Image (spheres, grey):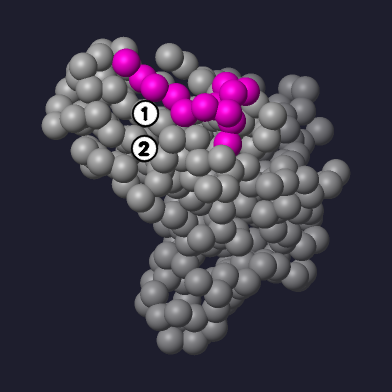
Amino acid sequence: MASTYNELGIELMATGENAGTWGTKTNTNLDIIQQAIAGYVAQAVTDGGTTALTITDGSTSTSVARNIVIKLTGALTGTSTVTVPDSVEKLYIVENATTGSQTVTFKTASGTGVNFTSTGFKFLYSDGTNINEITLASPPGGSDKQIQFNDNGSFGGITMGTTGQVLTTDGTTASFGDISGGASWQAVITADPANAVAGNGYFVNTTGGAFTVTLPTAASIGDFISFIDYAGTFDTNNLTIGRNGHNIQGTAADLTVATERAGFTLVYVDSTQGWLLQNN
């Protein structure tokens, strides 16, 4: 009984066949397996025509279609097609690196395939009849918590942000934005900055004399304002926090700060307690 070959061109040796050459043939088979799972090749595309990639039984030298990674190259002036053999089930990672902005179709010899309309990568598989594209946006089993990568390497549907921004989501859409949550620190103040602003931090310099910083007229739960004794003079020239109609620590009274190098944050909770000290 003679040896046969599977769809990848691996020789399936029959009992009693290839006496004395099993080592050589086994090494060839291992090379074929390596080509199928980790092989890379750059392939020039026929301009405006069809480039037929083949798999040769028992050989790696004329088996471009067996490689898992195929880079398509060439300067194109018309739409072009690249085919792989029918009846072969395998994965492909294909990069369209052609120039000329022409459509390149990657397909089986007799079936359908996938179009490249721009440069970039596609993750594909052959089911033995057609070439199909795998996208992280629509895998089997649902579409939640997924990210799609476009041909140019960007995130599908997401505009890239700037340096230092982070990717956030509300569960439906995603976008890049600035990191928030901390105080927006202001330049050193030596007088009331026309009422403090929620979300700001203030370096307070009372070297020239004590003064009052007035809280905002309106406040909502979670609003916060931070203060730091800039020159270590709160003990001699006090800082007063004007309550502006709100309670502070549950009391209808201004807050006087007389501790040297004090640093503290006031957080608004409600009309009963008003502004509460987060730290002191």
The tag earlier along the polypeptide, 1 or 2, is 2
Answer left or right for 96 relative to 113.
left
Q: Position of residue 2 (x, y in %)?
A: 76, 36
Nearer-the-camera pick, 126 or 116: 116
Visible in this render: residue 258?
yes
Q: Measuring 73% from the left and 52% from the top, which residue is drawn there?
A: 172
Q: Residue at x 69, y 58 (%)?
A: 133
Task: Give the residue pinned by disc 2.
Answer: 213
**Secondary structure found at label 2:** strand
Disc 1 versus disc 2: distance between alpha carbons?
6 Å
Q: Is residue 272 above or below residue 144?
A: above
Figure quadrant of the N terminus: top right
Residue 111 vs residue 34: left or right?
A: right
As shown in the figure, which amino acid type bears the numbered disc 1?
Thr
Check contact, mark 1 vs mark 2: CB within 8 A.
Answer: yes
Residue found 25% across the figure and 14% down from its top = 235
Label 2 Cα crowd, 10 Å radius (few <14 / some 14-19 / many 20+): many
